[in-house]
Amino acid sequence: MPRIGIVLLAVIAITGCIRPQTPPTGTTGRLVFYAGNDGQGKVVCTVPVKDGTFLRSTFAERGCSNDEIHSLRYENAKQDAALWIYDDENCGDSSDNAVITFTASAPSILVKTFDESGTHKGYDITYSHPDKDKGEASCFIVNVPGTGPQANTGLGKGAKAVGFVRFYEGYNGSQDNFCSYTINTLPYFRQGKPCKNDEAKSLKYENVPAGSTVYVYDNPNCDQGDDWAVMSTIRFANPRIVVWNFEDNDPDDAYAIRYHRQDGNLDGKVSCVIIDIP
């Protein structure tokens, strides 16, 4: 065989053995959830994700077992992808939860456990543990950077910029976070009934821009014939702005609020909401 042919075969053989370290754009990845720590035990659930994916779901909705997951492997991982894991089935933050941000693209990244905070090879994790109920993952949100219609538009660079409006049973963002709206695109508008009627007394804005406005109504049709209030952020909510209660007309350095009183019965009686994020 001519010398040049031998050289070409050698080059092909060598390059064929090199494993790509960065998945190409558009590659479909997978979240593989395990029953044990360190990617051990049975596979409880697999969730395909690709560039531009935004998904909020319970594990039950994916046909997977609830309260059984302890770790995961992200295959074809994308840098700046983010994953939120919640004990609460409504993705509320009143129970144990973890936020995982992937800091590198790689063929595979193993998240050994959700019950810790720290920096690891390929990911950072922040664990909040109001109840310390380990292994009881029930709800998750995943956001992967990309160019799709729901891919990180307007809220800043990377999946970490996903915003929330969270409603709480108690004053000052206390007690149960029974309802959370996920703001993954800008602009964002929603009108409807909250997750649970006659419960909300306060709310938190998280990672939403200045001018983000929420209207809360006692009337179930968002009619102004009964008590209602409107509140708007004055600055970017990073990481959060807490609205102490709704029956208030005192401005705050982070938000403005106006309470329209009819019979003085709005806190704990919210029946309809409008969320308008510019």
Image (cartoon, rainbow, N blue to C red):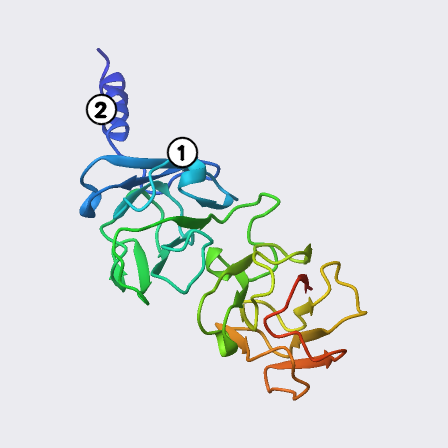
For label 2, the crowd category at 10 Å Cα-Cα, with few meaning under 14, some 14 to 19 and many 20 or more, is: few
Amino acid on which the number 2 mark rests in the picture: Ala
Q: Residue at x 54, y 66 (%)?
A: 167
Residue 156 as seen in the image, left or right of residue 274: left
- The residue labelled by disc 1 is 63
2 vs 1, front mark:
1
| Residue 148 higher or lower than 238, as above or below | above
Image point (77%, 71%), residue name: 226
Q: Tell me which corner region of the image, top left, top right, bottom left or bottom right, holds residue 197.
A: bottom right
Toward the right, the furthest residue is: 225
Of 114 and 102, nearer the camera is 114
Q: Is residue 99 left or right of residue 150?
A: left
Quadrant including the N terminus: top left
Front residue of this view, candidates 249 and 22: 249
- Nearest the viewer among 170 and 115 is 170
User: Identity of the amino acid at label 1?
Assistant: Gly
Q: Is residue 97 left or right of residue 258?
A: left
Q: Taking the image as drawn, is residue 110 in sight? A: no
The spot of residue 135 in percent (x, y) is 26, 51
Residue 183 falls in which quadrant of the image? bottom right
Label 2, secondary structure: give it: helix
State how far apart marks 2 and 1 are (Cα).
48 Å
Q: Where is residue 241 drawn, in percent x and y?
A: 53, 76
* Residue 215, picture quadrant: bottom right
Residue 189 point in image, percent of width and height: 69, 57
What secondary structure is found at the residue carrying circle 1?
Answer: loop
Disc sitting over residue 10 in the figure: 2
* Residue reaching furthest to the top: 1
User: Is 21 situated left or right of 94 in this image?
Assistant: left
| Residue 228 visible in the displayed image | yes
Q: Picture coordinates of residue 141 (x, y %)?
A: 45, 50
